[in-house]
Amino acid sequence: MSRSAEWPIAVCSVDVSRPIAPLTGLGRYSRVRVFVSHGDRLIGSVDVWHRGADTLSASRMIDALADRHSETLFRYALRRQLEGTASASPRLAPTSVSIVVPTCDRPDDLQRCLESLVRQRTRHQVEIIVVDNRPSLGRTKAVASRFPSVRLVEEHRAGLSYARNAGILHATGTLVVATDDDVAAPDTWIEKLVEPFSRPEVMVVTGHVLPLELETEAQCRFEAYGGLGKGFAAFEADGAWLRSTRDAAPTWRLGATANAAFRAAVFQDPAIGLMHVALGAGTPTGCSEDSYMFYRILRAGGTLVYEPSAWVWHRHRESMPSLRNQIRAYSTGHVAYHLLTLMKDGDRRAIVRLLYSLPRHLLVRAVQRLRRHSDYPLSLIALEILGNLMGPIALWRSLRRVRRLGPGPAPPVAKGTNAVSLESQAT
Amino acid sequence: MLTFGSEGCGGTELGRLITDRFAARIQRHLVADGLFAGDLDDLGAVKADCARRPPVDGPPVTVAVCTRDGADRLPACLDALLALEYPASLLDLLVVDNAPVDDATASLVRSRYPAVRYVVEPIPGLDRARNRAILESTAGIVAFTDDDVSVDPGWVEAIARIFAGEPDVDAVTGLVVPAEIDAPAQRLFEEYGGFSRGFDRRYERVDTVSGERAARRHGGAGRFGTGANMAFRRNIFERIGLFDIALDVGTPANGGGDLEMFFRVLKEGGTLVYEPAAIVAHRHRRTYEALRTQLANNGIGFYAYLVRSAMHYPDERAAFLRLGAWWLWWWNLRRFAQTFVSASAYPRDLVMAELRGSIAGLGRYQQSRRAMETTRGGDA
């Protein structure tokens, strides 16, 4: 296989509950990544090597789907038949949802994102809040003004957490959905994402993040690195899960704020609070504010549900330099996150992670690469190590910056049902 | 494959063995059929009549049987063709009689098979006969089979379904199963590898995006199938030319013209599909001598094909050289060496026959090209 065939990869989604149509205009690609859903349920993906043919016929796609997913589809069909429609899951009563979209002067991405958000088909009352984190440039305002239903909030202090918090503080919904400006959502996304809140113990729901396109080397490498999604299997995590490991619990595998919904009440819970402003994009630490948020919620006794079927499309960074920045930021933020759990929450498992399992993980991957068991470049592994080493300094600089800029206004006084504390809900 | 002893096997027992062995594949087919119907909800209850894909109201097909003095073999072949489950109005059955010594075939077809057209190709050569069939065909699709083959009733429909549903596909090959494994020579041919190329549909194409060398992945054209079960869109021959008659000389059985055409289709940017649902049953040679001749011809045909393709496509030469050298070592010489150390190795004289054929095949193509030019010069 020659190297150039590894990208670009065409991306599409297919709903197998309806007759499958052929795909055309594929002449630029060697393969297509097909994401398979059955109605509301996301099942998996399959790569079809069509090797530059312009069309991918329906029967060819069906062959690939049956080869890869026949067991899942069969089991799923059988279960639906046995259960019938009688045992459909209890539905969440209509409620109010605030979608918070921080943006950083990316008008084209924001346009696509908002177009997909205003198209949502849902029983819930939806409020869309765009937080402009670069208000001086003025381009975000122009995009937001094209959508009359969108509220625009400005946050001058650079940093994703500052921006997200500003949006959360303006949100009026019972539920707050976090997403990013480089995301586009299918039109049933909100409905599926908030459905698990019908269970009172659920405080967070995260969803799958699929690549919008895989056109460049950077986009394909990022997806191979793991992307932002957490797989096609649903799972749950709670306080017991968080305490169950000797090593630090892998909260970074629970999801990301590109696609997450919270009960608004968590932000007013004194044990949880808002996004930590020392973490996140736009700060020296670069990321992990979402992992830390999940950590605080689980520690306070809340439950997190990962619902892959509530997926969004994410446009990965196109250029290799920005991919390197992102991977370095992930590595830096990862270490900063562990230091923060150690310092603020007294979680000594962070030491195990930082001094044993993280170095071991990097070593294993480097060895795998050297033995050609993986094709993840060594240069990126080296970059991750560099990013890890920068973690402590980055956290120190970030915390100093927060002292200078202020941690942000306190949450408004709790009102109505939102004020129910986690303890009372958990018991 | 399931193997039974001489005591046979009851129906219930057979059903149990089949489900044990093939449950996953059956499930895969049910899901594929359900996806085709756009309805997965019915799968749970496996109905007595499994969801079948709807029949194609498909394209007209010419079925060509190339034969040479085959009056004794033809009746079984033609009876199977008349039993094809495909609308007769869309089916054009054609026998090409290649350099017949008498009129036995002609009178057989005319007296017993009035629905079958009969044409003669006077100059000997399988590829000449195939080209005659293409010129005589009236349909957009030409399917080829041999006179020692019985086609499955669904053979043409399986081929037509691919061509109807896949506008990009130029060639389809299918599964060739043994009609019988009675004689030791027939068992030896199956042991040699037989004609079967597996039970999974495959789409073959040279990757135009990565710019890969065609011969690197597709040079071993034998894995796509064989001339006893192949079909083409007729218009592809206008684009890439007819079968190369220079591959005929000295090998009346199989000169590698089929392999060469499979490779040419792919090299010229076409798509070939191996469709295991297109089934024919081949009656292998019953005598040891006939088997040895066939294996020698295989050697000649394969290497003549390699030489021909390397000569026509200079950009593929390095890849063909590497393939030829590897095949000589891996298939011919390694198996030859095994006959000295392993009791279960393939009979040495058969390996030798193929090896000798392979070496002869290296020079055969240029030789026959020269011969053809001389003849043409003499004619002028």
Image (cartoon, grey):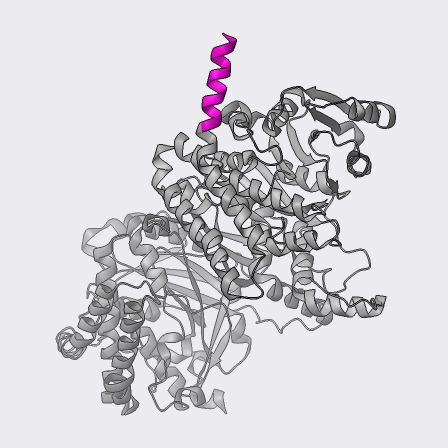
Q: A139 and A410: which one is in front?
A: A139
Left or right: A255 in relation to B168: left
Q: Is residue A79 shown in magenta? A: no
Image location of residue A423, percent across then percent down: 44, 90
Left or right: A201 in relation to B160: left
Eyeballing the image, is B377 above or below B329?
A: above
Image location of residue A280, percent across then percent down: 26, 70
Point 19% across, 71% down: residue: A387
Eyeballing the image, is B37 above or below B102?
A: below
Point 24% across, 66% down: residue: A378
Judged by its main secondary structure, the magenta piece is helix
Examine the image and state in which quarter residue A134 appears.
bottom left
Q: Is residue B368 shown in magenta? A: yes
Image location of residue A78, percent across then percent down: 69, 67
Q: Quadrant of the N terminus of chain B?
A: bottom right
Point 62% across, 66% down: residue: A71
Q: Which stretch is magenta?
A: B367-380
